[in-house]
């Protein structure tokens, strides 16, 4: 009985941690210059990441530890990987991307720490994030790459300032309504198709 309880209480955490091998393979393929394969593995990590919170809510096992594990996984999937991906596949000025990448990493860390400390905002039966959510960094990185692959070279001049702006939006105080996961799945499919 104790083992079943232990398994149930850690199921969402195990699902969160299941994303880690997929992220590592995504980094590997990025290092090998295989952008599309890299994006396929990070998309798999994204889908796994959306499942952990759903599982925790469904079987009522939300916990501080689970929130922290999820945030660490979010940091790698949505902040560290996109910065590395941009460095690897877009020929952007190194100094500009060093500044923008550092800003994104710092803002992502602060954003996730604030989320862990304060949680989501609940108002009138609606749930809000405070500031822009971290998956926006991954969305932007994939969009920049897809546009560059299609010959839109202006993205090389816009990527660093856009990443700096995303950094500011992540740590800002505006409210952004939490949406269902399905629009994210559609967006992920569209971005993968564009990056192909």
Image (tube, grey):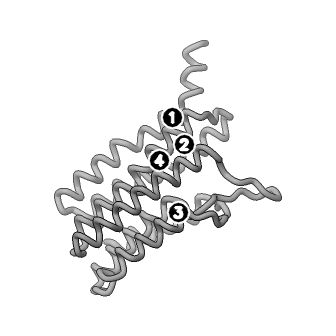
- Report if the CB atoms under discs 2 and 1 are less than 8 Å apart: yes
Task: Name the residue at 19% across, 56% down.
Answer: 31
Kindly report which numbered mark, 2 or 3, lies closer to the viewer in this rendering: 3
Q: Which label's residue is closer to the chain start, 1 or 4?
A: 1
Q: Give the quadrant of the C terminus.
A: bottom left
Q: Is residue 138 left or right of residue 57?
A: left
Q: Which of the two discs, 1 and 4, sits closer to the camera?
A: 1
Residue 162 versus residue 61 in the image, above or below? below
Is residue 143 rendered to the left or right of residue 71?
left
- In the rendered image, residue 154, in percent from the top left (x then y), is placed at 32, 87
Residue carrying label 4: 48
Quadrant position of residue 140: bottom left
Q: Nearer the N terminus, badge 4 or badge 3?
A: 4
Disc on res. 13: 1
Of the residues under marks 2 and 1, which one precedes in the sequence? 1
> Which circle marks residue 155 in the picture?
none
Residue sitting nearer the eye, 86 or 33: 86
Residue found 23% across the figure and 58% down from its top: 30
Mark 2 vs mark 3, CA separation in Å: 22 Å
Q: Nearer the viewer, residue 8 or 139?
A: 139
Q: Which residue is mark 2?
A: 52
Is the residue marked by circle 3 packed among few (<14), some (14-19), or many (20+) residues within 10 Å? many
Q: Residues within 10 Å of mark 4 (few under 14, many from 20)?
A: some
Q: Which residue is mark 3?
A: 170
Question: Is disc 4 in contact with disc 2, using a CB cutoff of under 8 Å?
Answer: yes
How many angstroms separate mark 4 from mark 3 (CA)?
23 Å
Q: Earlier in the sequence, mark 3 or mark 1?
A: 1
Which class describes the residues within 10 Å of circle 1: few (<14), some (14-19), or many (20+)?
many
What is the secondary structure assignment of the residue under circle 3?
helix
């Amino acid at each position: 009985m104790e083992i079943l309880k232990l398994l149930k209480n850690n199921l969402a955490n195990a699902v969160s941690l299941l994303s880690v091998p997929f992220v590592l393979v995504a980094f590997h393929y990025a290092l090998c210059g295989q952008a599309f394969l890299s994006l396929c593995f990070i998309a798999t990590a994204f889908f796994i990441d959306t499942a952990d919170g759903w599982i925790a809510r469904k079987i009522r096992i939300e916990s501080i530890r689970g929130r922290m594990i999820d945030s660490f996984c979010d940091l790698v999937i949505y902040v560290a990987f996109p910065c590395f991906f941009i460095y690897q596949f877009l020929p952007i000025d190194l100094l500009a991307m060093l500044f923008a990448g550092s800003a994104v990493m710092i803002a992502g860390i602060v954003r996730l720490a604030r989320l862990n400390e304060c949680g989501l905002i609940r108002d009138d039966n609606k749930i809000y994030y405070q500031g822009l959510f971290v998956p926006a960094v991954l969305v932007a990185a994939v969009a920049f790459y897809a546009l560059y692959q299609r010959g839109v070279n202006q993205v090389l001049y816009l990527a660093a300032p856009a990443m700096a702006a995303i950094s500011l939006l992540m740590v800002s105080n505006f409210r952004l309504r939490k949406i269902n996961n399905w629009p994210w799945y559609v967006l992920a499919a569209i971005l993968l198709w564009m990056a192909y």
